[in-house]
Amino acid sequence: MKDLPIVSPHGHVDPALFSDPDASFGTPTELLIIPDHYVFRMLYSQGFPLENLGVPTRDGTPVEKDHRKIWQIFADNFYLFRGTPSGIWLQQELVEVFGITEKLTSGTAQGIYDQIEECLQKPEYEPRALYDRFNIETLCTTDQVTQDLDHHLAIQESDWNGKIVPTYRADSVFNLMGENWVDEIKALSEISGIDVVDYSSYIQAIEQRRSYFKAAGATATDMGVTSAFTHVSTEAQLNSIFQRALQGAVTPKETKFFTAHLIMENARMSAEDGLVMQLHVGSNRNHNDFIFNRFGPDKGFDIPEQSEFTKNLQPLLNQFGNHPNFNLIIFTLDESTYARELAPLAGVYPTVKLGPPWWFFDSFNGIERYFKLVMETAGIYNTVGFNDDTRAFPSIPARHDLWRRLTVNWLSGLVVRQIIDEEDAYSMAKSMCYDLAKQAYRLEN
Amino acid sequence: MKDLPIVSPHGHVDPALFSDPDASFGTPTELLIIPDHYVFRMLYSQGFPLENLGVPTRDGTPVEKDHRKIWQIFADNFYLFRGTPSGIWLQQELVEVFGITEKLTSGTAQGIYDQIEECLQKPEYEPRALYDRFNIETLCTTDQVTQDLDHHLAIQESDWNGKIVPTYRADSVFNLMGENWVDEIKALSEISGIDVVDYSSYIQAIEQRRSYFKAAGATATDMGVTSAFTHVSTEAQLNSIFQRALQGAVTPKETKFFTAHLIMENARMSAEDGLVMQLHVGSNRNHNDFIFNRFGPDKGFDIPEQSEFTKNLQPLLNQFGNHPNFNLIIFTLDESTYARELAPLAGVYPTVKLGPPWWFFDSFNGIERYFKLVMETAGIYNTVGFNDDTRAFPSIPARHDLWRRLTVNWLSGLVVRQIIDEEDAYSMAKSMCYDLAKQAYRLEN
Amino acid sequence: MKDLPIVSPHGHVDPALFSDPDASFGTPTELLIIPDHYVFRMLYSQGFPLENLGVPTRDGTPVEKDHRKIWQIFADNFYLFRGTPSGIWLQQELVEVFGITEKLTSGTAQGIYDQIEECLQKPEYEPRALYDRFNIETLCTTDQVTQDLDHHLAIQESDWNGKIVPTYRADSVFNLMGENWVDEIKALSEISGIDVVDYSSYIQAIEQRRSYFKAAGATATDMGVTSAFTHVSTEAQLNSIFQRALQGAVTPKETKFFTAHLIMENARMSAEDGLVMQLHVGSNRNHNDFIFNRFGPDKGFDIPEQSEFTKNLQPLLNQFGNHPNFNLIIFTLDESTYARELAPLAGVYPTVKLGPPWWFFDSFNGIERYFKLVMETAGIYNTVGFNDDTRAFPSIPARHDLWRRLTVNWLSGLVVRQIIDEEDAYSMAKSMCYDLAKQAYRLEN
């Protein structure tokens, strides 16, 4: 399975890396530490201020600029990652992408920095070259509703053959209580050419953007919510909430009902335009006010919450659950919902599939739990293979490799116990490592 | 352990199969597909309409009648069941019950249909013959409160020696919001000879039926509820809710409190008459309105919900938890309650035992999780062995076999780690595969 | 790892065992059965009244006094503990502490009783001698806020070198709805010399006691709560609740908000005085009224409940989560919170560490689950090694031994899979079995 091309149907790699043929990754520290919240959250947990790790502040207060110094802190404390998925990925990446053979320690830190730095200056370490070396077939990005997709269009018009597919994500205009929601609505008006003044023009602008994304090659949308609660409100109710949000006066309860209706609207639109709907549930974002105010979002302080799907999704599934053109892929951060709720739902609704283990659960044990908790009830064909979900482009092979090894290991266990035969196992492995992702995300063409 | 007789203390096999000496199972499709919601839910999840699978509609709209055509769809898609419990049971059943040696595929479908069909016409494939061949000692059925148990009585009066034991289940008269509740109350009046007009006559009729079932050999009752919430209301409150239900005007909240009291009443009656009380908690029944309206209940759309036992059962356990004649067996669909709530409760209350892994968790991994999550705190002697809980009679040996293999495998692991010795292991295995079920369900005589 | 000294940073051993050089453990039954709720809860679950097991009643109603008769019941039913942690500990204790080579059965019961009894009369079985033989370096006890710590002071003044460290626990004065809360407040006034008449003097007295404990060597506090809900109230609100509690008129809701504020106050005090804060969440104490009224607390009827940390701790962590002098160790009885909430929190907040598997989960499978569910996200260095949490002093080596074996087994698995190397494994093992506990509880000096 290790030689199958990589299909990466959901992730956060910056498309600008591929639109400019000469794009580069910067320094080793810019590549591996500063943008990776998995890495600096662990260092922060042991008392290292984010400033010392070069994480930029929102207000421009200066932070550490010496990338070798930051790298040294990282190497001094690399033992913290023992037994963690970041540890596995980073080690494999150092060996397989950069050819590092020494263990990263205080003593080897600067030598390894030199080696990586040298690599990154070579043409074969430019993003497009690595894309080919990594044997990537398709790489989907995640793009905000207000983006013009210039990078994607430039890639399509270029003579480079990589397939970088945009994914529509409108959370910035969905979250009524977001800091910049009013600005986001203005941006939405501008880019859509539709004056967003009420609920009806809001939905119209959103639909316009979906068409634009679809025309630019998108096959899927994404939506992140704290709760999967779905509920239908009247347009009058929704419009009244919308107006209050424009005035900055919306309440958490109103937001809850607005979001519950928006999930339904997204399902309706997906049933209409055929874009696959992804729903990511359960992250309590920016849990630490101090860190959020100083450094902004995505700083390692998104903490999972309990989730509920059986009751929460019932209104949505009663409306769209049997629809022939609707496809919903659900992601959870609450593993207790795997066997209890999500596998039973995915194992019967023709419209529902279960996404791979997400975030903290994209790990050795997390993947093993997923197989054991999900597959017996859902069957593998109601799941969608693997997502690397990463912004760390050079970690992509290591992440897919872990999934593939664990897939084959799990299937071998079934063969040994005579639950499946070898022929089944090969076929299932190829599905789980390649076909299911392509099919579920409609990436066949 | 494989030669021990089968004790099946909870299931849904139709007693009519045994009251008529010439009963038969019909076609292979009638035996294995049409009545098995595990099977057709998986096919539905991949887009096959239930009509095409021969599942009868409520209003009589015609569905596929060609059983070979349905069988072909099943065979074409049998790969969907790879790694699922249905896959394990079906394969073992084909081999061990019907002597099929080929793998079920599109190509072998009709040949295998022929073979099964031929078997089913032989006398040794009649239900009574299979009962003996399967080495079943006791088979408990589940019977509605308004049934007259004619089949059980006929079996008892026959010269056949099989032990088919009725189990009392009154959910149809308990669920105030059930579609046909008023009709069920009429049926209850009729069969009990007690005019059910208020809460007091209602309870009287229920008690009369329990006596009838006990006289017909029942040793246990069953009750299915969404939540384990227990609470005492006054008779005036209960009667007022009851009257509103008779008028079809009852609310979900009233129903919740009524059910909470009924669980207590059931416990009281069990303490009085000694029938073992089974409580099945957490299934959100008929989740899909479209399927329910068109095909009725038990169509694969019963989805588990989160459950809570520690607080919910406290009122009940404070009243009956130390009672010398009360026996409660609890089943959950929320595995997070195994180690957190149910094993601690079963491990201390003399009246509480924990039922085996239920429904989606009666599976390879489900059983392994159960052993690991439950046994350390509850001890095996506060559990009740295995229930196959099936309406698919020919799958019974495969289901018990899986439990027995996993039991022995789990115990072997404890021996290897020197946690128990071999003598302990043999004794525990026999308990878990035979004795505990007999004892817990009072089936010794 | 088996030769490392034992650091026991949290437990319930009686310090009086060490202040008196001639203290003894009493009879085998007094040592192993009567005080051990793990043992008698299992016997009660199978119908043996606590009276027959010698558990003292609150009102002095006589209970079984013949310790050999109680021992015989225990031995007759020792099979109940097969596969349980108590079974593992007891067997190892009999072999390694008392040199028993026979299996405990009905037949061997009295002979084994003789052997243990004989041991217990020898000087090498006195507590101080066993402390040395067990290679204990530090043993922390748990001590109520109103205690004078005379035993600890006596030990410190003695010529014995054992290190017995007190831990401050104020639950008795925190729980407004406790039976004896008003008496506890009187005791608090008395021992602190501060007349506790309102919220302000209450907090003052509590702070005075913390200083007293710290001066007596305490390095940590402990707090047990049903829910982790934290919330700030005004002093006026708190005082009003306090006054109502003094009058015995407090409601559950008031208690909930009072406790939510007290958790915050404890965090504030810890940030100020540097005592490590332990928070034990989720035990529904004294679930069985009959047993509580007759025998009192700690009788095996503390049953876990669902817990929530992400939202509940947010107010506390926003106030103290980034504080350089605050240290919080969290314990849960809800394993579904390990990977979902606690590992993500411990893996990023510099002030938060996750305690070892608690109570029912201090077991073979419980520890294995903990490693798999926690370590990938938290990293081992955000955990705190092992706590035996026991009042059964002679079981301490067996408990630490189980943790150590499972640690080494888990790490070996990582080495075999090449996730870590052997050098890492040795270093991690020593941390998990020794260093982390010392560091987290500030026991280095």
Image: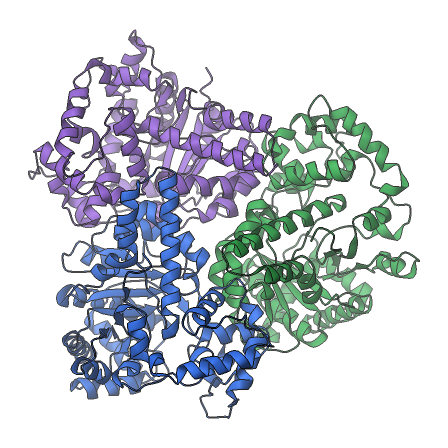
Chain colours: A blue, B purple, C green
The answer to whether one can see residue C66 in this image is no
Judging depth in this view, the residue of A200 and C292 nearest the camera is A200
Identify which residue is drawn at 62% across, 39% down.
C290
Tell me if residue A386 comes above or below residue A236 in the rendering. above
Picture quadrant where residue A154 is located: bottom left
Q: Is residue A194 left or right of residue B445?
A: left
The answer to whether one can see residue B394 in this image is yes
The image shows residue A221 at horizontal and vertical percentages of 24, 70
Judging depth in this view, the residue of A155 and A223 nearest the camera is A155
Tell me if residue A104 comes above or below residue A230 in the rendering. below
Outermost residue toward the right in this view = C159
Identify which residue is drawn at 57% across, 66% down.
C260
Q: Count the numbered circles shown.
A: 0
Q: Is residue A46 left or right of residue B128?
A: right
Identify which residue is drawn at 55% across, 78% down.
A109
Outermost residue toward the top in this view = B159
Judging depth in this view, the residue of A430 and B17 nearest the camera is A430
The image shows residue C58 at horizontal and vertical percentages of 73, 41
Judging depth in this view, the residue of A104 and C117 nearest the camera is A104
The image shows residue B35 at horizontal and vertical percentages of 21, 33
The image shows residue C298 at horizontal and vertical percentages of 67, 45
Instruction: Tell me the quadrant of the picture where the C terminus of chain C can be found.
Output: bottom right
Picture quadrant where residue C225 is located: bottom right
